[in-house]
Image: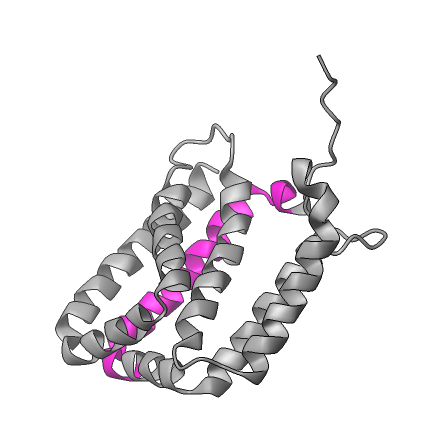
């Protein structure tokens, strides 16, 4: 039997659960309170982002830098992830990421924002999910309960980015539904903040 390598703990896994819950709760609370108070402005901003290539390019560069930091094997890089059996293609993945980013930046597609938004959600999900992984705190399931559906949506957006544009157009026509969903999201964020303060 080959010996299991003693891999260093990734910086994401060192994030305290309480801090991850508090940050996630505050961010979600602010977003949902803004959407509940001004649904027209928030949905309008989302619709504008879906149409404006500048928003897409800014988010594309953010995704690319984040992914490069996860892949780049330079000394003392705290963000570098282990690829396990795929370590041999780390350099290929790194250059592929840069090439894809450069091509999409120079030749943006009409629905680029939906695709890069999906990629951003996939990257962002790793932080709170790593913090809650294999933890025993009461109600720590609240974090994956939010992120698993979000991950599903993110994967769909990477494949079918036009769905974000369609969703933004639907929300602009159904502001009452947006307000109701925003209030529900704010209540979830409050519950998460309470749990992070008491149980985590």
Task: State whether residue 195 is above or below residue 101.
Answer: above
**Residue plotted at (65% across, 42% down):** 14
How many discs mark residues in the rendered view? Answer: 0
The image quarter containing residue 15 is top right
Image quarter where the N terminus lies is top right
The answer to whether residue 80 is seen in the rendering is no
Among the 4 quarters of the image, the one containing residue 6: top right
Place of residue 129 in the rendered image (x, y in percent of width and height, measured from the top left) = 49, 44
Q: Nearer the viewer, residue 87 or 194?
A: 87
Q: In this view, does 156 lie to the left or right of 103?
A: left
Residue at (51% x, 31% y) in the render: 135
Q: Which residue lies furthest to the right in this view?
A: 75
**For residue 26: magenta?**
yes
Q: Position of residue 35 (x, y in %)?
A: 29, 73
Which image quarter: residue 165? bottom left
Q: Where residue 71 sits: x, y (%)? A: 70, 54
Q: Can residue 98 be seen in this view?
A: yes
**Above or below: residue 99 compared with residue 9:** below
Q: In this view, does 111 lie above or below 147?
A: below
Please report the residue visible at 62 percent of the width from the left and 41 percent of the height from the top: 13
Q: Chief secondary structure of the magenta span?
A: helix
Magenta stretch bounds: 12-41
Residue 26 pos. (x, y %): 44, 60
- Position of 105 with respect to 36 (left or right) is right
- Indicate the colouring scheme: one colour
């Amino acid at each position: 039997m080959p010996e299991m390598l003693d891999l260093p703990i990734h910086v994401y896994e060192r994030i305290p659960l309480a801090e991850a819950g508090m940050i996630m709760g505050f961010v979600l609370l602010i977003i949902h309170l803004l959407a509940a108070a001004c649904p027209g402005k928030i949905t309008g901003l989302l619709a504008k982002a879906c149409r404006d290539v500048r928003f897409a390019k800014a988010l594309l560069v953010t995704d690319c830098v984040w992914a490069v930091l996860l892949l780049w094997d330079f000394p003392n890089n705290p963000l570098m992830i282990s690829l396990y059996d795929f370590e041999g293609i780390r350099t290929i993945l790194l250059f592929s990421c840069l090439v894809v980013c450069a091509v999409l930046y120079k030749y943006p597609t009409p629905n680029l924002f939906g695709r890069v938004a999906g990629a951003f959600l996939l990257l962002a999900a790793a932080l709170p999910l790593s913090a809650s992984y294999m933890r025993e705190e009461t109600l720590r399931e609240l974090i994956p309960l939010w992120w698993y559906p979000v991950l599903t949506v993110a994967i769909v957006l990477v494949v079918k980015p036009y769905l974000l544009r369609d969703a933004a157009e639907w929300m602009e026509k159904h502001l009452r539904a947006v307000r109701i969903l925003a209030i529900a999201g704010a209540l979830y964020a409050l519950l998460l903040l309470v749990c992070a303060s008491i149980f985590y």
